[in-house]
Image (cartoon, rainbow, N blue to C red):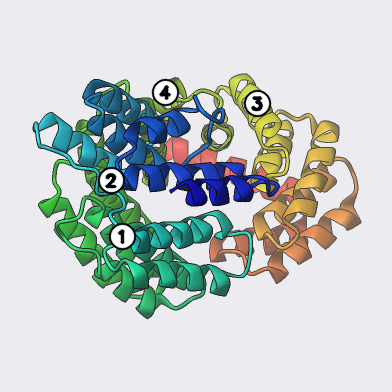
Amino acid sequence: MSDAVAAFEDVAEIPDFATFAYYHEALALALVGDFETAEEIMSGAKYGPLSISTRGIEAHAQVLIQLERTEDASALIDDTLALGFNAELAGLRNRIDAGEEIAFDFVTSAQQGTAEVLFNMAAILNGRISPNTVLIYARLAQHLRPDHVPALVIIAQVLEDLGQYELATQAYGEVSSEHPAFFVAEMGRADALYADDRQDAAVEVLTALSKSHSDISMVHASLGDMLSRIRKDDEAISTYTTALELRDPEDRSAWPVYYARGIVHERQKNFAEMEADFRKALELSPDQPDVLNYLGYALIEQKIKLDEALTMIKTAVAGRPDSGYITDSLGWIYYRLGRYEEAVEPMERAVSLLPVDPIVNDHLGDVYWKVGRFREAEFQWKRALSFDPEEKEGIRIRHKLEIGLDQVLADEALNETTLTAND
């Protein structure tokens, strides 16, 4: 074992490989039963703090259990889950709560240790190098350890990224229904089916999952997302509500579900419910740029609470300055407030960030018109038409090109007044 330790320490001398080497040294020590030294490494007591993945946390927790430090293992898992859900960690936590006897089975042989090395290479390099190379590492890991579910999930994700949706679906489907990550794999399988234009099959997968795993909020949220994508809005709202009912009302990680439900409410013109959901999302996670922008923009379109909307969108821009949509919102609220000169710079920047977006080009045309730059306004409206806007927007843009923005706005105001009078 001393030769192996020396080899790991040699690898640790390579720039950026220290954590990788020390982590695998700890696994090797745990494999031969030296849990004390393994824990010293994983805790940072021996070589200093290690930045390890949630899978590494699972290994560390198993080591702590072997040292009869089950409470420490539980606390480590709880602290990690507080940062984001992980199926394997949640499964281990459930086994602890059930009083199961838990052996160290994270790696049980040198072959499995090698599989873990290859898996970690795939995980580290995923998104940084050719996906084909990542796929090779993950495939080798799975070959050496067929039950390595995280490797299988990486394989499926990479295949999905490569557009190999049928193969990705098959890979996700290989995860056993008994494994804690089964429902995560099924959600991935549904996404691959959707990407492969098999929407009905995707909904069927998630609907079945919402019944077999009815107590898991994430599953219902995933089904809600799918229903929202295919514009089954009433069902999506109901499903998001179920997801939220399974969470603590003050669970900060629930903000994306409130945000998603708020978007559907906005599409349904349920503005009071939309605003309530967006504000709850911000209460749980303040200063989220997307939420601030969506709520701010919705308030602009309703022509209410414009000062608050401006503050929201300025905060959103500060948080995500390179977002064309958020920058467009800033220019558009200046326009709504009649501060046309101030609207020019952010709207021009929005077009530079989203040069082929029809709505953003249309907005810049309106701003140019209001500051007297009529030819430039007409140019932007023509550009907007060239990017295939929705039919209703296209009709309005052509109307502006025919009679000018001022007359269009006057006609719209007259129509609105007439409708109100008739009501």
For residue 361, above or below residue 61: below
Alpha carbon distance from label 4 to label 1:
33 Å
Label 3 amino acid? Answer: Thr
Residue 133 in view, yes or no: yes
Q: Residue 315 has which mark?
A: 3
Tell me the SS state at disc 1: helix
x 25%, y 71%: residue: 201
Q: Categorize mark 4 by other alpha carbons within 10 Å: few (<14), some (14-19), many (20+).
A: some
Cα gap from disc 2 to disc 4, whole angstroms: 26 Å
Q: Position of residue 316 (x, y in %)?
A: 63, 31
Q: Quadrant of residue 371?
A: top right
Task: Pick whichever, 326 or 129, lies toward us.
Answer: 129
Query: Which badge, 1 or 2, comes first in the chain's sequence?
Result: 2
**From the viewer's perspective, is 245 left or right of 395?**
left
The label number, if any, that marks residue 149 in the structure image: 1
Label 2: which secondary element: helix
C-alpha separation, residue under disc 1 versus residue under disc 3:
41 Å
Q: Which residue is mark 4?
A: 284
Residue with the most extreme front position: 2
Assign a secondary structure to mark 3: helix
Which residue position is annotated with label 2? 88
For the point 26% across and 28% down, which residue is it? 67
Q: Secondary structure at mark 4?
A: helix
Kindly identify the residue that appears in the image at 75 percent across and 52 percent down. 353
Look at label 4 and name its amino acid: Leu
User: Can the viewer see residue 274 in this picture?
Assistant: no
